[in-house]
Image (cartoon, helix red, strand yellow):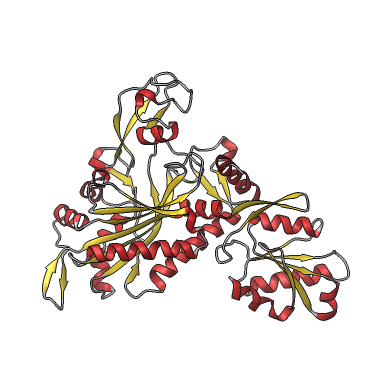
Amino acid sequence: MAEHDLMEKLVSLSKRRGYVFQSSEIYGGTGSVWDYGPLGVELKRNIKDAWWRTMVHQRDDIEGLDSSILMHPRVWEASGHVAEFTDPLVECKNCHRRFRVDILLAEAGAENLESARCISCGVSGQWTEPRQFNLMFKTFMGPAEDDAAVVYLRPETAQGIYVNFLNVQTTARQRVPFGIAQVGKAFRNEITPGNFIFRTREFEQMEMQFFVEPGTDDEWFERWKETRIQWLYSLGLDPARLRFHAHAPDKLAHYAKAAFDIEFFFGGTIGDGGWGEIEGIHNRTDFDLGRHQEFSGKRLEYIDPVLQKRYLPYIIETSIGADRLTLAVLANGYREEEVEGETRVVLGLHPSLAPLKVGVFPLVKKDGMAEKAMKVHEELRAKGIPSFYDESGAIGRRYRRQDEAGTPFGVTIDGETMETDSVTIRDRDTMRQERIALDQLVGYVRERI
């Protein structure tokens, strides 16, 4: 399978199996806005839950937060988003489509605008001068649409953490070093979105801001780099498709002392030669707390009870896109195999992430097998194991449908089940089947997910 075909195949599979649909599709769709279907919402939720367990539930030094999307406008002045959150924009003089310069050059494979071919109409070198464009969505709070009522849809979740730093620190009785984690929506008015759910205007972030004493930040930065990539390995992502990319000193954001991206190899036109960022680890120094202290007039310093000194903590940020990671999980799991002269499409999702854990199939719809299978299906769901019941078509086709949906196990109810109360359980990846007692089924599945 050619790499450039993968995204097209994922879009098709996602629509066919209920992972992702285009938003407002019956009206022709909304550009680069996507809806998650029955399986997609479960996969994305499983990913977010796995992140939350690792970051919050399994650690004593990280607290959770859910801050609001709408914030005081001064927050975005302090953060630099009003003045700095811009991208250079150019317009094709032939077709009048607009593009972000960096994305245009990457997708056109050009070093400069003079040699860049328009990826819409194909004309080369016919570009307006770049102009700056702010990526924040602006709206109005209250009945009057005037400047005094302007608010923004947040372009990131991190600022909600910074302005709540002391609230969380004091109420949770945390001492530095500690972190605050948040999962939430963010909005960016991207000029050149695309590549399915890789770059969208509405997306979810999973961000953690870790507050440390100045001077210990380099050590914590390296520690979090290793922690984060090991977590991605634990999701079943192929290590050969993950890499670190360091931001060059002249490419660092205005707030950053150091920054690394974790990139995943998607192939196609994504990023640099198919490598696209899914997570960033940044040393933000004390820039954010310092700016909010300056703009709000409130002291945000941490008082160390042992050293008896005040300081603004440095911040190590880990920020991962839930949508991009979902796409990486789908791309990592997709494969096509030849089995008995037919193509088998498999979505090899890690069992812990798979939306459905078990497919339950009566071999035939007679002799009580269908009723027995439905009872097994209902008992699995009652135990909190997502299950799908299917009695339609040949058993091989039912296996194939669940292979494509990413379901790791198939359970078949047959004549022997009716006699011995045992079932055949089939592994999605190896297609190996084994016989187990029905009363062992729940334990068997739980052990593997």
Instruction: Report the side of 122 relative to 319 (left or right).
Output: right
* Residue under the image location 44 percent in, 38 percent down: 193
* Residue under the image location 88 percent in, 70 percent down: 367
Instruction: Report the side of 338 relative to 370 (left or right).
Output: left
Residue 275 picture location, percent across and down: 44, 46
Viewport quadrant of the N terminus:
top right
Q: Which residue is nearer to you in this view: 417 or 37?
A: 417
* Residue under the image location 55 percent in, 40 percent down: 4
Task: Answer yes or no: is residue 72 visible.
Answer: yes
Residue at the farthest left position:
309
Quarter of the view holding residue 117: top left
Residue 226 picture location, percent across and down: 36, 64
Residue at the farthest right position:
367
Residue 445 picture location, percent across and down: 64, 73
Q: Which residue is nearer to you in this view: 228 or 193?
A: 228
Instruction: Report the side of 341 relative to 174 (left or right).
Output: right
Residue 432 picture location, percent across and down: 72, 67
